[in-house]
Image: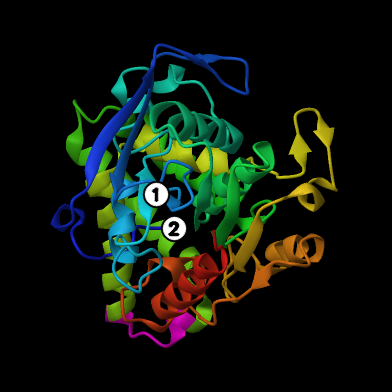
Amino acid sequence: MLETPGTARSSLAWRDGIFYRPSVRLECGAALSPLILAYSTLGTPRPDGSNAVLFLPGASGTRDWIAAHTYPRGCADPEQHFIISVDALGGGDSSRPSLGLGANFPRYSIRDNARIIHGLLTEELGLPAIKAAGGASMGAMIALELALSFPAFARGIFLWLPAVRVGPLFPLFTDVLEAILGLPAAQAPAASPGVAGAALMAAGLAYFPLLVSRDFLDRHSPSERQRLARSVGQAFASKWQAEDLLSRYRSLATHDVFQRGDVIDEAVLGRLNARCLLMPSRSDQFFPIEQAARMRAQLPDSLWQPIETDAGHWATSRERGSSEHTSITTATHFFLATLRD
């Protein structure tokens, strides 16, 4: 998922912060030293956290993506909610390979992100619980793991483009991404900035036709398809270092909600306490709707609201005013309103 264009985050009274720990042990057994988790907040929290809403980014997003969803009658109203947006591991201003460790940066998981973000919320922000957490794609996976790992913490989770695991196309694309971005020249941006930028642009161009559906491509002219593809490539090249982007996609490609340590637990979703909004995209090639349907089957009380779109995995990154954005905003606003104190 790419970031959604929206109002500049700086137009609101956001407060930025850093959650720091000298070291943290990851699920793989390695230590991440130091831990840096960047975050932003908007509004005033209630002492019990009952108005706190956490937004989590997609694999190619940073905490600024929240701009398109925080306004009166938006997904979360800053006059009613205490809004938290974080840079998950691997991107933004948080711990990431390009800060110095490079290839020695330890492999982190979706559950590592969930556990570390829970530490931010409880230790740094002092929240005993939150109203809801959610996001798209990787963000949805982190929100689900947060609710599973800490059952009494979130009253609700809103999952845009959810899946129990990625579809078969996504790991294959991650291999392509690694082949493009893993070249030695692309890994040396200081020495070869042009080569690094070209590799990231190529990765974005390869990503675009898989991000959307064939119907989406068919209804756009060749020049418009080229323009949109280049916009994805330019977003990769302008906002990412190759090693950081790869680390995000690897964590997403290997995640399976049923894999709990060394055990496969097919009943884990049945133990979810949080109320759930499921919003898959009907045309998603990366996270096929069948994956979300598996979640629905085990969560019969969940709110099921598919996004009717041909934009595929790009559905949650469409501009404000689009049918996709309106659908997401309306459903999420309603869902948060059902989580009454």
Q: Nearer the viewer, residue 8 or 154?
A: 154
Where residue 260 appears, as percent x and y from the top left, is 76, 34
| Residue 1: image tag | 2
Q: Residue at x 33, y 29 (%)?
A: 187
Q: Look at the image and tell me whether residue 48 can be seen.
A: yes
| SS at circle 2 | loop
Q: Residue furthest bottom?
A: 219
Where residue 156 appears, as percent x and y from the top left, is 59, 56
Where residue 216 appears, as percent x and y from the top left, is 46, 81
List the residue tagged with mark 1.
Answer: 60
> Is residue 210 found left or right of 81 in the rendered image?
right
| SS at circle 1 | loop
Q: Nearer the viewer, residue 228 or 40?
A: 40
Q: Nearer the viewer, residue 55 or 320?
A: 55
Q: Which quadrant, please, contains the C terminus?
A: bottom right
Quote the CA–CA distance across marks 2 and 1. Answer: 6 Å
Asked if residue 275 lies in the magenta stretch, the reply is no
Tell me which amino acid carries mark 1.
Ser
